[in-house]
Amino acid sequence: MTDLEWCIDYLLKVNNTNRRSIGLGFDIFRGLLNITMPINLSDEFYERQDRVLQDLLKGKNITSDSEFNNGLSVYNGDITLIKVDAIVNACNSQMLGCFVPNHRCVDNAIHSFAGLEVRRDMMDLMNKQGHPEPNGMCKVTKGYNLPAKYIFHTVGPIYSGDKQDEIDLRNCYLSCLREADKMNLKSICFSSISTGVFGYPIIDASKIAIETSYNYLKTENKNIEKIIFDCFSERDYSVYNRQIKEIVR
Ligand code: ADP
């Protein structure tokens, strides 16, 4: 039996389900990771899960922070395939990752390819905190099976058009930059926080992301060398490139 088959059988039992219909092969596994609360999972499960995820990564093309210049850059690709000191996840206030099997949000991708250790660690942090995460803060876990060393978890605003959205989104960037600086990290890659399911218009959101980061580098920064904005679509990539040219002169 392969590690993948073993993990699928194990997670089907843990979840008391036979929902193989949520996908095929790796997608069944990913869907099962997404619905699992990591309570008392065995060490053997984590070892096998890690081997499955590490094997998968071997076949993929990884982009390294050494390919970027110092300062602000834009990257068009999957945030689970970038080797930086920290990637930034766009979360909801529960902070436990996406529970919808195989959903295409960034939170789902990050938790799925990092492994269930991340949900387990976030569960501990959130239990200690005892209340949902407010917008604009930053919590840290290791990257586990991702190329990135750390994952920063932040909750962006659900777009309403209110002035507070802008303040909250700015705080997401600021909190993560301050945390990276405090941890003496050199490179950080942001997902495009709030611009997917949370509906923040990309032009406004990209301005906030770039202005906040640019000002941070000019005024507060001590340690960060590279700030990378990850755009998942060609459209977002061209918006970010245009905004960077306008803001960073
Ligand atoms: P939010 O709920 O904060 O809006 P979403 O995940 O819906 O978060 O969207 C944030 C952004 O992340 C969107 O631009 C989306 O296209 C992008 N995204 C989704 N998957 C990935 C991924 N694997 N890597 C990088 N960006 C991603």
Image: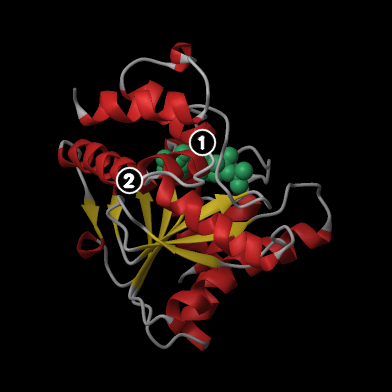
Q: Is residue 104 above or below residue 219?
A: above
Alpha carbons under labels 2 and 1: distance apart: 13 Å
The amino acid type found where label 1 is placed reads: Thr
Residue 163 occupies which quadrant of the picture? Answer: bottom right
Residue 169 occupies which quadrant of the picture? Answer: bottom right
Residue count near mark 2 (Cα–Cα under 10 Å), binned few <14, some 14–19, many ≥20: some
In the rendering, which numbered label is found on residue 36? 1
Q: Is residue 193 left or right of residue 10?
A: right
Looking at the picture, tell me which residue is in the foreground, 25 or 160. Answer: 25
**Which residue is rendered at x = 72% and y = 57% of the image?**
132
**Quadrant containing the N terminus in the rendered view:** top left
Secondary structure of the residue carrying tag 1 is loop
Disc 2 marks which residue? 46
Residue 65 occupies which quadrant of the picture? Answer: bottom left
The amino acid type found where label 2 is placed reads: Tyr
Q: In x, y percent, where is residue 229?
A: 43, 56
Q: Residue furthest left?
A: 58
Q: In x, y percent, where is residue 98?
A: 56, 39
Asked if one can make out residue 242 in the rendered structure from this viewpoint, the answer is no
In the rendering, which numbered label is found on residue 180? none
Q: In x, y percent, where is residue 218?
A: 48, 84
